[in-house]
Image: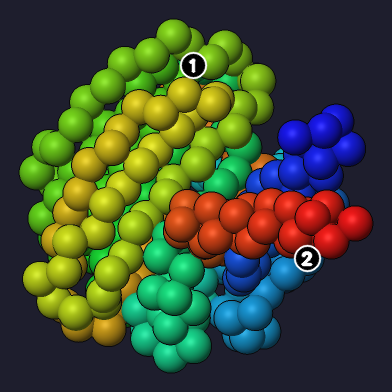
Amino acid sequence: MNHQLLLRLACATAIVASSDAATLFYADDFSGSDGSFNGASAPEVNTLGGSYALESFGEQQQLSGNSALLVRDPGGIAAGLRFGAAGDRYNWGTGSTAATILADGTLRISFDYATSNATDNNSWIAFGFGTANSDPASSDSRTYNRDEAEYGLRIEGDRVISFVNGGTDLSNVSYSSIGNNTFVPVTIDFGFTSFASGSTVTSVVSINGTEYLNESFTLDSTDDFRWEIGSSPFAGGDSFMDNLSIGTVPEPGTFAVLLVGAGATVLRRRRQR
């Protein structure tokens, strides 16, 4: 292979690798004036429909310094952000959104996370996946272990914990503190083959570029996948989220096929000369 061919293959690789998400469903950099979240943060991308933007539940969340400040409910009830209104939460497990996720294989949720107290275990950002189409009851104090949640995540400044089936511990992994008031990238990758009840979903969680969780959970309902972002119900450090992006990622095989095709084209042109 001559240098020109190597250069062309390198360019083809770069072009393919630069396509992080096949479809971008939602993106929000949380720009806006400080104050109440609802109505103040307009997402840059929203293919879910205008009525399914992020909204507060439990307690009015806040915009602060062009990021989302996760506010706790002083009564100790789970609070945070959901897609859509109470009783009309967006369902990621049906329609064209689900079809796109299944076609591409992976749903990626990425964002930047910061906390004002990285060693305080009462300060976290949480996720509840497979929740009901309703806001938490008064007995629910945490998003990640609501009774009906199929999978939950609790990300702190120095550890990540996962749960299944409404609060059963799955993993608990510690890592070096991210430091106070320092945003770090977080990526949650879900691998779907079906949205049918009993299907297995893989979950890979990376924080600040390092993979800490690689596990799976089981769906317990069909074509029904709603989820929420939650704050800690306890007094602790403040938690912030920025640069939220939700989209699909093509299977690695897609990249390989594209790259092989690009290489074959270059070789064919070289032989024709």
Question: Residue beneath label 2, please?
Answer: 44
Q: Is 51 situated above or below 172? A: below
Percent across and percent down for residue 105 are: 41, 65
Percent across and percent down for residue 85 are: 49, 79
The crowding category of the residue bearing disc 1, from other C-alpha atoms within 10 Å (few below 14, some 14 to 19, many at least 20), is: many
Q: How many marks?
A: 2
- Identify the image's colour scheme: rainbow, by chain, secondary structure or one colour: rainbow
Callout 2, which amino acid? Glu
Callout 1, which amino acid? Ala
**Which quadrant of the figure has residue 54?**
bottom right
Q: Is 207 situated above or below 111? A: above
Residue under the point 74% across and 53% down: 267
For this view, does 151 lie left or right of residue 109?
left
Residue under the point 47% across and 69% down: 104
Residue under the point 37% across and 86% down: 94
From the viewer's side, name the closer residue of 121 and 176.
176
Question: Residue beneath label 1, please?
Answer: 118
**Sequence-first tag of 1 and 2:** 2
